[in-house]
Amino acid sequence: MDLGAAGLHEQPFLTHGKPLVFVHYAGQHAALDFLNSTYEHNQGLGLFLGPSLSGKTTILRQFVNSLDPEVAVAMVDGAGLNTTALLEAVLGQFGYRLDYNCVNELINMLKVFTMQQAASGRPPLLIIEHTHTMNPSALRVLCELASTKVRHTGALRMIFSSDRSMQSIIEAPAMECIASRLTGEYYLQPLMRSETMEYLYAKLEAGGSYDPSRIMPRAVCDELHAASGGWPGIVDRLALLALAKAADCPVLEEHIEHPAITDETGAIRLQLLDEETHPDDQAGAAENKSPRLYLSLNGKTIGELTLDKQRALVGRSEHNDLSIDSRFISRHHAMFIRHGTATYLMDLNSTNGTYVNSRKISNHVMMHDDVISLGNHSIKFKYPTATYRSQTDEAGLADTIIMKNLDDMRRMLALENTHTMPLDMDKLMASGDSDN
């Protein structure tokens, strides 16, 4: 659906970054109360749990913004962090310019800072997201920080966020310092059916609509609630897809996708079904063949790839469709996504960035003869059919197509993961700091 024809001047259902509007609902209020009570407790250490796409990060940011500006806050993604990475991230957000000789020096710096702040009546706050994925060495550091006290109170307030139960971690004997300080645990609750409609309408109004019910009637809102389970992140994604599928107003119930939501290992995972390829698209693809990539270094072509699949990964790992052996290129650097006759390029949070025609991009609709720069390498995109952007320039459409492919990308990356083994926290935490 054309956003302008719907009375919208902005895409209301953003799937990343700051939302156009923060919408209040009962589960969110209860979560904020829990986070506030955790910080105010003199031993405050809380577990904040909820499935993927449940809105945990949005609520945590709201909470941080509500605190006294004088309170030092570090909000860190714990995914895969080892000791050094954790300490550098926390100290950096606390305002330190890092110049150190060893890890112990970092730990001591952090301890001194937290004790000074706590003694002044403003204990700092550390928020760790995806805590269950942290390296055992980093968990040991959290234990050491948890044991730091000023006048018998915790010097550092701590909130651990996760999309699954952390019971096996907390109950490990090696985590006694954490368990002894635990003051509460909160499971985030989804939107109720009536709240889902209010949530959708508030976002549509923020996007410019004067009559949200004209775009999404009540029955459609109810269908979105049923399809999403009431989890805000899934509501956003399904609403965005519905807007893209609808030719004009209003969105119909048939435009609502019903993703498979599983509850394995306590996590909720969203799997959006691949959009069906229409016969016309197949005929067009056969007539115009497929895009080709030409990889070059120092002006010399060193590789080629035909984009004849829906997705193609580019990066340093040998598991990519186009593997580039260079220290300037991330293991999984970027991904091409085919959608009809359009090709999208998505940067995968690479270290050195992805550039198209000398401009840094996060996602981009590819045109014939575009030149992609990855480190010292260049990729020429050849596809004569892609000479105009047409509908692919619509706000939010690139996000829609890319988002629909993210789970498949994760499954592709999982080829490099080792088999999951039972987690023995005590054994892992006694294994030393070889990962630093």
Image: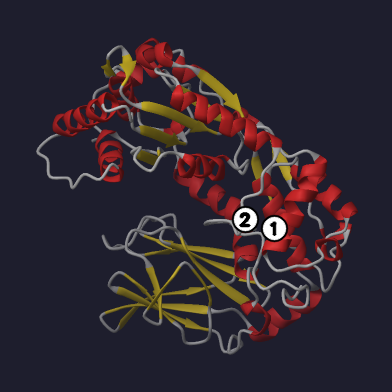
Picture residue at 12% right of the left edge, 45% below the top: 99
Question: Position of 214 compared to 431: left or right?
Answer: right
Q: Nearer the viewer, residue 353 or 307?
A: 353
Tell me the quadrant of the picture where the C terminus can be found: top left
Q: Amino acid at mark 2?
A: Val
Check disc 2 and report its element: helix, strand or loop. loop
Give the residue pinned by disc 2.
Answer: 21
Colouring chosen for the image of the structure: secondary structure
Q: Nearer the viewer, residue 153 or 352?
A: 153
**Disc 2 residue crowd, few under 14, some 14–19, many 20+, Cα 10 Å:** some
Is mark 2 in CB contact (under 8 Å) with mark 1?
A: yes
Q: Nearer the viewer, residue 121 or 187?
A: 121
Instruction: Let me know if residue 275 appears in the view.
Output: yes
| Residue 363: image tag | none
Q: Given the current orientation, which residue lies at the most extreme right position?
A: 219
N-terminal of the pair, mark 2 or mark 1, is 2
**Disc 1 residue crowd, few under 14, some 14–19, many 20+, Cα 10 Å:** many
Q: Nearer the viewer, residue 387 or 173?
A: 173
The image shows residue 203 at horizontal and vertical percentages of: 69, 58
Q: Is residue 251 above or below residue 156?
A: below
Tell me the quadrant of the picture where the N terminus can be found: bottom right
Check disc 1 and report its element: helix, strand or loop. helix
Picture residue at 74% right of the left edge, 48% below the top: 259
How far apart, in angstroms, are the residues tagged by discs 2 and 1? 6 Å
Picture residue at 49% right of the left edge, 41% below the top: 66
Q: Is residue 156 above or below residue 193?
A: above
Give the residue pinned by disc 1.
Answer: 203
Q: Is residue 349 above or below residue 378?
A: above
Q: Amino acid at mark 1?
A: Lys
The image shows residue 71 at horizontal and vertical percentages of: 35, 37
